[in-house]
Image (cartoon, helix red, strand yellow):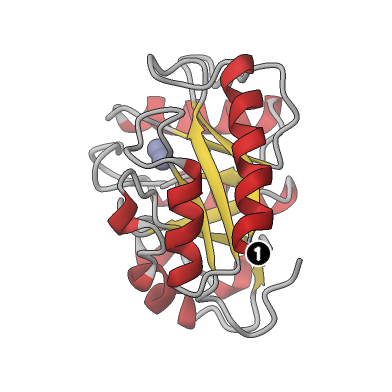
Amino acid sequence: MHPGRRLNVYDIHIHSRYSDGEAEVGEIARRAKERGLKVIAITDHSIEHPLGLSEGKAKRRQEEIDAARSRYDIEILSGVECGIGGDGEIAMPDFEFDVVIASIHECLPPEEYYRRIELCIKKYEFDILGHFHSNIFNSYERIPEKDAEILDMLAEHDIALEINTAHRAPPLDLLNPEKKLKYSIGSDAHTLSRVGDIDWALKTARGLRGWRFLL
Ligand SMILES: [Zn+2]
Ligand SMILES: [Zn+2]
């Protein structure tokens, strides 16, 4: 898959009823199609979340994804969003996902926030760092040298930095063309009405023309 010049056809971060989202997979696909999206990823929370995906849920969700894909003629990736734990760990059910997001889901002191993300990048394989310096889950304050280190590590490990509309993340000064990062665009929708709500991300991404995107 390649975005060509159009970025307004992707939403690579959507939650369904298989975790804490409100909508069914089929409803999400229909809504995405109506909004003109071409590729979406259903990225439910992973096993560390009380409502997260188990292996059984991931399998059942896959059946719904396959059915919705052919019914609505839209590419739907089977994804998971893993919370990053105290030792930088992420965990997921025994299932082959198309896309893995790793995100911090707590507010943490800066040293701890950066430490966990660095450990996670070093020790685990994933595709996207979710909502870095989110306005909801953050590090209270930022350390510019640490930010630069994280961006370098993402580039080195070929991990995309997510532009997340719901969390207004990342801060715009982190979108540095010299870093040669990959990016991913996501609404982080938990309701049907927010599927494809990527306008803020698109405005943010317009300055990134010519840069690499995940898809
Ligand atoms: Zn998240
Ligand atoms: Zn999410």
Image quadrant where residue 79 sits = top right
Query: In the rendered image, is residue 152 in sight?
Result: no
- The quadrant of the rendering that contains the C terminus is bottom right
Where residue 114 appears, as percent x and y from the top left, is 45, 34
- In this rendering, is residue 159 above or below 46? below
**Left or right of residue 116, residue 122 in this image:** right
> Going by the image, does 168 lie left or right of 86?
left
Q: Residue at x 39, y 25 (%)?
A: 112
Instruction: Report ligand 2 position as a quadrant.
Output: top left
With 158 as the anchor, is 188 left or right in this view?
left
Judge whether residue 81 can be spotted in this image. Answer: yes
Q: Is residue 136 above or below residue 109?
A: below
The quarter of the rendered structure image containing the N terminus is bottom right
Q: Mark 1 = which residue? A: 73
Q: What secondary structure is marked by label 1?
A: loop
**Residue at the front extreme?**
71
- Residue 39 x/y as whole percent: 61, 62
Write the residue at 67% across / 37% down: 126
As shown in the figure, which amino acid type bears the numbered disc 1?
Asp
Pick the residue in front: 94 or 65. Answer: 65
Residue at 43%, 40% (x, y): give it.
Answer: 24
Q: How many marks?
A: 1
Residue 20, quarter of picture: top left
Q: Picture coordinates of residue 204 (x, y %)?
A: 40, 74
Relative depth, front residue between 169 and 61: 61
How packed mark 1 is, by other alpha carbons closer than 10 Å (few <14, some 14-19, many 20 or more), is some
At x 62%, y 65%, the residue is 179
Q: Position of residue 37 (x, y in %)?
A: 53, 69
